[in-house]
């Protein structure tokens, strides 16, 4: 039997499962503090997931603008896990290497790199990694006032975290286990 | 009263005053904190954006470490993002045995077993329910008569897990603020989003959200927060937001245990008041005057 969705759109399957009972009421959009900045509103995005518009979804910034406030999840009259659906889209974008929103993806990735290396995140190291990856020579200057403020308050540490246990093996195993049996 | 204590990475860095003031306050009310040995990062908002299983393994690792300590008590967590992740591990593992098994397969790598035996509590739950306003009132040495405090709860202490407060109209901080003699600032921004990491990755969006909160805080003498991410967003961008809104939106922002700590007589130093990024001097002067006014009247 021919399925409704082409093979390429199958990467959306886990998200489709989460939102298939959506009644398009728009409560999510009305509750979202970031909807004003999105190219597609949350309600619109769920419809696009049902229609399998994979490229449009992954070229949009909508799911990266979710700040996980859980207002939509709380209010959805169908009780759908909408914040989790936004997170799942972020996870699929990483897995499929669809780099649409460079700042957010590099922010998350470098945060996790610092955690993988030392077990705890060291904000100074993670922001340095982030700036290097962004390859934007003037970007660090935007954070200079804040950086200097933090430095004056003794909040920027250039030492690595105390409990320095690498989580390398744990990370590798988690990714393997997730890929083997998602 | 005893708790396992999971500070989380921010409390070792940019939110060190949250760590100091939490420990100082808890000790002053006679509660013992036992820090989880060799704790590691909970995954913050980064792990859930990258890998689902990892986002549960990271908090579960810490819960497994805590279980090994055999302390027979709940776990106290001051950071809302850590709280949510640890709670996620607790909830997912409780509902899905196959997932719990999968988490444990990964944790075997570190010779750890997660049995889902520990209850995770946010600091605000401990302050408002376990300790409570009455106990705090009985310890007050310095009242904040005539001062107005805006309670800011943020998101993840309230949602999605509805544990100790109303997720739309949070109120758990109000009796605590009233217990120290202050008035509660009436606003509807207490449970609204601070912009989280947007202030870094999408500043034009983050700044809008911070602006909306600071604008409605006008009229209050200070905002109190219970999350290092919220605190950073509300404090660190006040110059930028004021410039952008053509309006002076500077306001002192304190962590809740800093404010309550002051009221029960802890010193500025014990509460690390010099570490806050917002200017607290005016607030501290006014609170001294308020206190002396209330004893002499």
Image: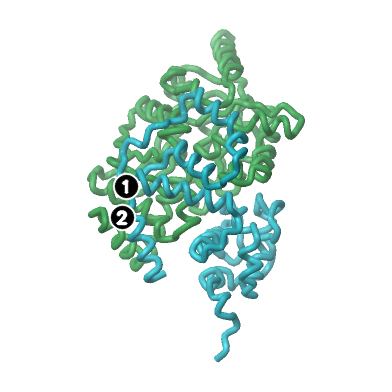
Q: Quadrant of the N terminus of chain B?
A: top left
- Left or right for A49, reference A154: right
Residue in the image at 72% along x and 30% along y:
B243
Q: Nearer the viewer, residue B62 or B25?
A: B62
* Circle 2 chain: A
Vertical position of residue B90 compared to residue B202: above or below: below
The circle on residue A166 is 1
User: Which label belongs to residue B239?
Assistant: none
Chain A shade in the render: cyan
Residue A93 lies in what quarter of the image? bottom right
The CA span between labels 1 and 2 is 8 Å
- The residue at 58%/37% (across/down) is A140
| Disc 1 secondary structure class | loop
The residue to which callout 2 is attached is A169
The image shows residue B287 at horizontal and vertical percentages of: 57, 17
Q: Position of residue B100 (x, y in %)?
A: 33, 62
**Local SS, label 2:** helix
Residue sitting at x 54%, y 35%: B231
Q: Position of residue B259 (x, y in %)?
A: 50, 26
Is residue B191 visible from the viewing direction of this image?
no
Residues under numbered marks 1 and 2 in contact, where contact means CB atoms less than 8 Å apart: yes
Tell me if residue B136 comes above or below residue A105 in the rendering. Answer: above
Residue that appears at 70% across and 52% down: A37
Chain B in the picture: what colour?
A: green
Classed neighbour count for the residue bearing mark 2: other residues with Cα under 10 Å, few (<14), some (14–19), many (≥20): few
Q: Is residue A55 visible?
A: yes
């Amino acid at each position: 039997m021919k399925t409704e969705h082409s093979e390429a759109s199958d990467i959306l399957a886990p998200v489709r499962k989460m939102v298939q009972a959506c009644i398009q009421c728009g409560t999510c959009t009305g509750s979202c503090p970031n909807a004003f900045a999105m190219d597609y509103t949350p309600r619109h995005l769920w419809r696009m997931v049902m229609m399998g518009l994979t490229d449009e979804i992954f070229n949009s910034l909508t799911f990266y603008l979710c700040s996980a406030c859980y207002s939509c999840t709380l209010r959805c009259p169908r009780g759908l896990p909408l914040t989790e659906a936004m997170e799942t889209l972020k996870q699929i974008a990483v897995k499929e290497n669809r780099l649409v929103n460079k700042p957010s993806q590099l922010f998350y990735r470098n945060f996790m790199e610092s955690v993988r290396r030392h077990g705890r995140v060291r904000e100074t190291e993670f922001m340095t990694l982030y700036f290097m990856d962004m390859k934007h020579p003037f970007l660090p200057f935007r954070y200079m006032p804040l950086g200097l403020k933090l430095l004056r308050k003794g909040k920027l540490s250039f030492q690595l975290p105390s409990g320095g246990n690498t989580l390398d093996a744990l990370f590798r195993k988690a990714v393997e286990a997730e890929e083997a049996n998602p | 009263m005893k708790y396992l204590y999971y500070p989380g990475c921010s409390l070792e860095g940019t939110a060190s005053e949250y760590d100091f003031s939490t420990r100082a306050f808890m000790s002053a009310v006679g509660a013992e904190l036992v820090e989880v040995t060799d704790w590691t990062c909970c995954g913050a908002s980064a792990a859930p954006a990258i890998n689902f299983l990892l986002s549960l393994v990271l908090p579960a690792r810490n819960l497994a470490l805590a279980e090994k300590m055999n302390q027979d008590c709940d776990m106290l967590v001051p950071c809302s993002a850590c709280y949510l992740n640890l709670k996620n591990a607790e909830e997912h593992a409780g509902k899905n045995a196959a997932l719990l098994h999968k988490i444990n397969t990964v944790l075997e790598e570190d010779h750890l077993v997660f049995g889902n035996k520990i209850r995770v509590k946010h600091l605000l739950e401990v302050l408002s329910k376990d300790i409570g306003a009455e106990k705090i009132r009985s310890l007050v040495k310095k009242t904040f008569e005539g001062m107005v405090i805006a309670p800011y709860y943020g998101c993840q202490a309230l949602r999605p897990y509805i544990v100790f407060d109303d997720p739309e109209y949070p109120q758990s901080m109000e009796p605590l603020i009233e217990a120290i003699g202050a008035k509660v600032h009436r606003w509807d921004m207490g449970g609204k989003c601070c912009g989280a990491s947007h202030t870094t990755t999408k500043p034009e969006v983050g700044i809008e959200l911070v602006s909306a909160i600071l604008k409605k805080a006008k009229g209050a003498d200070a905002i109190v927060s219970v999350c290092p991410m919220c605190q950073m967003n509300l404090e660190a961008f006040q110059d930028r937001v004021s410039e952008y809104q053509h309006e002076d939106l500077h306001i002192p922002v304190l962590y809740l245990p800093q404010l309550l700590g002051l009221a029960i007589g802890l010193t500025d130093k014990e509460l690390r008041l010099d570490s806050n990024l917002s200017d607290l001097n005016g607030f501290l002067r006014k609170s001294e005057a308020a206190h002396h006014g209330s004893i002499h009247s």
